[in-house]
Amino acid sequence: MSFSHRNMSGRHRVVIIGAGFGGLFAAKKFKDADVAVTIVDRTNHHLFQPLLYQVATGILSSGEIAPSIRQILANQDNVRVVKGEVREVDVNAKRVTADLGGKDAVLDYDSLIVAAGAGQSYFGNEHFAEFAPGMKSIDDALEIRARVTGAFERAEITDDPAERERLLTFVVVGGGPTGVELAGQLAEMAYRTLRDEFRSINTSDTRIVLVDGGPQVLGPFGKRLGRKASHRLEAMGVEVVLNSMVTDVTREGVKFKDMKTNEETFVPSYAKIWSAGVAASPLGKHIAEQLGVEVDRAGRVPVNRDLTVGEDRNVFIIGDMMSLDRLPGVAQVAMQGGQYAARTIIDEVENGTSPEARKPFDYFDKGSMAIVSRFNAVVKMNKAEVSGFVGWIMWLVLHLLYMVGFRNRAVAAFSWGLNSVSRRRWQLVATRQQLHARNAIRKLRTYEDEEGKRSIEVRDNLRFGEGRDTRAVSD
Ligand SMILES: Cc1cc2nc3c(=O)[nH]c(=O)nc-3n(C[C@H](O)[C@H](O)[C@H](O)COP(=O)(O)OP(=O)(O)OC[C@H]3O[C@@H](n4cnc5c(N)ncnc54)[C@H](O)[C@@H]3O)c2cc1C
């Protein structure tokens, strides 16, 4: 299947892979430009990842942080939205192949912007994922919500004190912004929101353990803000375990090793959450190999100063997939990268400037922030460091500013306002599907792979099985 725009033939064709922060901001920048843009994403929504933890902990609903891509771009006539998973990029043929649910779509391009982001990394221990979901998608956040609420429900009905303790112990792996925000919110849920809602258990007995391999939480924020965040978490009842590497995650709990003493600790826990590492989309390696470039350990592609790869001036890689000047994997880097790539293409298409005249990408650091608890956030802007209530107000304003859609902003502002004055949370729906679907799909895929291999073996045996009893094989 080949795609082309209605009434857009002859125009410069731009394909954007991914409608996250980088891809969406690039697409928006093309508004009114004389180009035909196709943006392809495997989901139908633009995900505001920084607020995933609020979906996981029942503050916001999923729709509020994941508006429809098609709706956002509905008024941009030169943009076509395709929902499909990109499987292949052929940089010589300038062609992208996407799987549209069983059917392949071929998208030809003149310029390509690759913004497929990053997934969770378990540092080679992929089996940890079965019991400790990461937090990268709406599905992940809803599964975590189901695991967290499910833990309290099970604890309420068990008669076994050891099992109750295990159910009321939550382990968050990774002390970056996501881990800190999640641990803080779990503490608020346990010690504030759910306090009066159970009859057999006291949710104040809940134990929340935050484990990190480094010497502080929020490493990139610097020592002072890291210490403040730790103190605040500890004051809320979170156990912060530093310099410790997780060595095993099982159904029963989490084992970690103190890197200074080599002492191993096992914490029995039902709900475990992984927020420790990221790996760039494998599309990066796939493209880099074709252009003779080697990816880094996290799978990021080293890019030129104009965000292109190797010798190919038409392939831009941006956001979490790119490696340049040790820029962090944050939304601003992706957004500014997307806008830069779009501006560069527009300039060359409309004004005839040459790739040699490109100005290098110049990142403007607007700072980083993480919320620790209600009314408390840490903010780092160049040398300025802010924490506490003022930080929380800054966090609030900035997140409202960057959320997409007036309704989402209004609903989020209302929910946060309500959450400040009330203990309740209104988005605690949890279903069996949310709890089991990810692992069920994984098992189904393994089964299908094994069945696929088995049927290939059977076919090969039938085809090449000279001297074999082919009847026995086919029976
Ligand atoms: C839980 C969490 C909290 C965060 N908090 C913050 C924060 O507070 N502040 C901050 O600045 N940053 C934060 N980040 C990081 C920030 O979200 C990322 O840096 C940013 O999203 C990167 O943008 P991107 O466009 O590169 O990728 P993404 O925004 O991840 O977008 C990638 C898009 O590509 C699509 N895609 C992937 N593979 C394919 C494929 N093969 N075919 C088609 N489509 C594909 C995905 O569906 C997705 O829509 C957080 C991230 C997470 C996970």
Image (cartoon, rainbow, N blue to C red):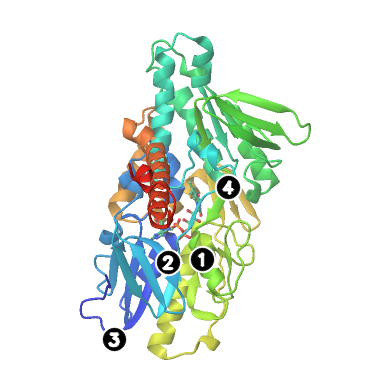
At 36% from the left and 37% from the top, the residue drawn is 437
Q: Could you give the CA–CA distance between mark 4 and mark 2, rounded to whole angstroms?
A: 25 Å
Viewer-nearest of labels 3 and 2? 2
Q: Is mark 3 within 8 Å of ligand 1?
A: no
For numbered disc 4, what is the local secondary structure? loop
Q: Which residue is mark 4?
A: 277
Viewer-nearest of labels 4 and 2? 2
Q: Amino acid at mark 3?
A: Gly
Q: Amino acid at mark 4?
A: Gly
**Mark 1 Cα-neighbour bin, 10 Å: few <14, some 14–19, many ≥20:** some
Residue 170 or residue 216, whichever sits in front: 170
Viewer-nearest of labels 3 and 1? 1
What numbered label is drawn on residue 286? 1
- Sequence order check: which comes first, mark 3 or mark 1? 3
Q: Is mark 2 within 8 Å of ligand 1?
A: no
- Sequence order check: which comes first, mark 4 or mark 2? 2
Q: Could you give the CA–CA distance between mark 4 and mark 3, rounded to whole angstroms?
A: 43 Å
> Can residue 39 be seen?
yes
